[in-house]
Image (tube, rainbow, N blue to C red):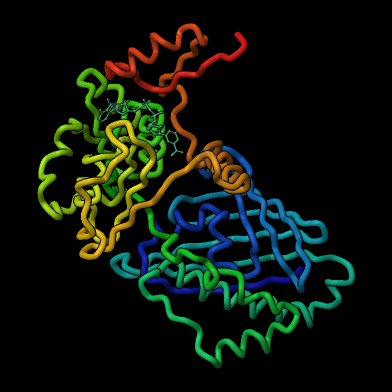
């Protein structure tokens, strides 16, 4: 048995640190030996949740299956892992610092490598220790995204000198993540969904509220407010309210994000109401395909982003990732979403309902009833 013990102090409250590390899928963001990590059981992470982790040791890929065997919320986590030729136990303890502005994280790994590898402990242990130090540094960076520093030349050389068997090592882990703000939680961030009672909008309301956003649902349907609240909307606004101030170059910053299903002036105004650096996903054109009243001001004054969404030509691998998320962490409240089936013959009635602004939720067309 090889034991590795590490500790790191991060400037982040204990609850945040615990929540971030509870989801072992996040380990690919900070553990440089992890190439890919994913949750393999549905629903939120809880005791008995399972994960699959692809490690890369000395140029070889090893897939480990992990189970979250014990949790003491806010205090500790225990995981048990099994790979093709090794088993692991990980125990992570969280100790709050004074006034909870920082947390000490204690990490213990017991690795059972068996046989020949056990006899090579003298070689393996320093390698693992170096990897552990590096993982703790990257964990601190992941939890303190505002304090990212690139490794200096000496540190870079040290990684390579200590880890000749894992040259790909420093390309993995947190340093390689395109978005280093991943340990940010979405709690309380305000997102507006336009066309909220539609097929796309209602699913977005459900998913975003599950992820912790404060969702404002914009709708033209007076009678759908309770349903939208049941889906997770924290607030409802009439769609006309989003048209106010169309003549102004920017509006009061209100939204951290926008999921827009309608286009036209509603999207233009939503862009003008994004907070600094916020993003709007442009999905549809129910109101209009035009952005004729848009100006560049929100982009150059607030650095906002307009993100195009296309679900047709999107590469299949990305679709698979999305479906995987929809089946697990993003799983919407299916029992609350409305959907019904119609035959082709019933479609004209459906179109009348759409044009009258009465349809809500999804409609599945049965091609061969
Ligand atoms: N980009 C993609 O990959 C992708 C994928 C799927 C769909 N889409 C597009 O996304 C849009 C929404 O799709 P959907 O399936 O959700 O359609 P939907 O079920 O018909 O919903 C559209 C919603 O827009 C709102 N709305 C209707 N008329 C409006 C108007 N004149 N002005 C402003 N809002 C109006 C209504 O919601 P409220 O009554 O609650 O306001 C309606 O429920 C469509 O344009 C669709 O073609 C794009």
The residue nearer to you, when weighing 277 against 58, is 277
> Residue 367: x and y, percent?
58, 14
Q: Residue furthest right?
A: 116
In the drawing, does residue 26 fall left or right of residue 2? Answer: left
The residue nearer to you, when weighing 145 against 223, is 223
> Residue 362: x and y, percent?
43, 22
Residue drawn at x 80%, y 66% as measured from the top left: 113
| 337 over 315 or under it: above or below | above
From where the camera sits, is residue 69 visible?
no
Quarter residue 192 falls in: top left
> Residue 298: x and y, percent?
22, 58
Q: Quarter holding the N terminus?
A: bottom right
From where the camera sits, is residue 272 visible?
yes
Q: Quarter holding the C terminus?
A: top right
| 280 over 331 or under it: above or below | below
The quadrant of the picture showing ligand 1 is top left
| 234 over 268 or under it: above or below | above
Picture mark count: 0
In the drawing, does residue 254 fall left or right of residue 79? Answer: left
| 280 over 350 or under it: above or below | below
Residue drawn at x 37%, y 66% as measured from the top left: 12
In the drawing, does residue 245 fall left or right of residue 172? Answer: left
> Residue 149: x and y, percent?
43, 80
Residue drawn at x 18%, y 30% as measured from the top left: 238
Residue drawn at x 35%, y 51% as measured from the top left: 186
């Amino acid at each position: 048995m090889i034991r590795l013990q590490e500790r790191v102090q991060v400037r982040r409250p204990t609850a945040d640190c615990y929540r971030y590390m509870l989801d072992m899928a996040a380990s690919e963001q900070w553990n440089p030996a992890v190439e890919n990590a994913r949750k393999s059981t549905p629903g939120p992470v809880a005791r008995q949740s399972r994960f699959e982790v692809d490690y890369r040791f000395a140029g070889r890929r090893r897939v480990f299956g992990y189970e979250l065997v014990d949790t003491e919320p806010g205090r500790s986590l225990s995981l048990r892992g099994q790979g093709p030729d090794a088993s692991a136990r990980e125990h992570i303890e969280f100790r709050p610092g004074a006034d909870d502005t920082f947390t000490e994280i204690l990490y213990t790994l017991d690795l059972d490598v068996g046989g020949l590898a056990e006899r090579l402990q003298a070689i393996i242990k320093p390698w693992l220790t170096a990897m552990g130090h590096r993982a703790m540094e990257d964990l601190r960076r992941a939890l303190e995204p505002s304090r990212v520093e690139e490794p200096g030349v000496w540190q870079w050389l040290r990684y390579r000198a200590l880890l000749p068997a894992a040259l790909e090592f420093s390309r993995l882990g947190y340093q390689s993540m395109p978005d280093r703000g991943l340990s940010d939680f979405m709690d309380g961030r305000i997102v507006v969904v336009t066309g909220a009672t539609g097929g796309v909008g209602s699913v977005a309301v459900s998913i975003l509220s599950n992820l912790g956003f404060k969702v404002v649902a914009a709708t033209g349907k007076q009678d759908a407010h309770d349903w939208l609240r049941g889906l997770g909307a924290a607030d409802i606004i009439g769609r006309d309210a989003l048209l106010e101030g169309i003549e102004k170059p920017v509006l009061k910053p209100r939204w951290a994000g926008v999921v827009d299903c309608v286009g036209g002036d509603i999207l233009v105004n939503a862009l003008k109401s994004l907070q600094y650096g916020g993003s709007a996903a442009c999905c549809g054109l129910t109101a209009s395909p035009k952005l004729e009243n848009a100006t560049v001001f929100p982009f150059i004054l607030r650095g906002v982003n307009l993100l195009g969404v296309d679900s047709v030509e999107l590469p299949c691998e990305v679709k698979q990732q999305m479906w995987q998320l929809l089946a697990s962490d993003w799983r919407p409240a299916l029992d609350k979403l409305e959907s019904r089936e119609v035959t082709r013959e019933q479609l004209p009635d459906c179109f009348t309902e759409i044009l009258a602004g009465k349809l809500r939720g999804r409609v599945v067309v049965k091609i061969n009833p």
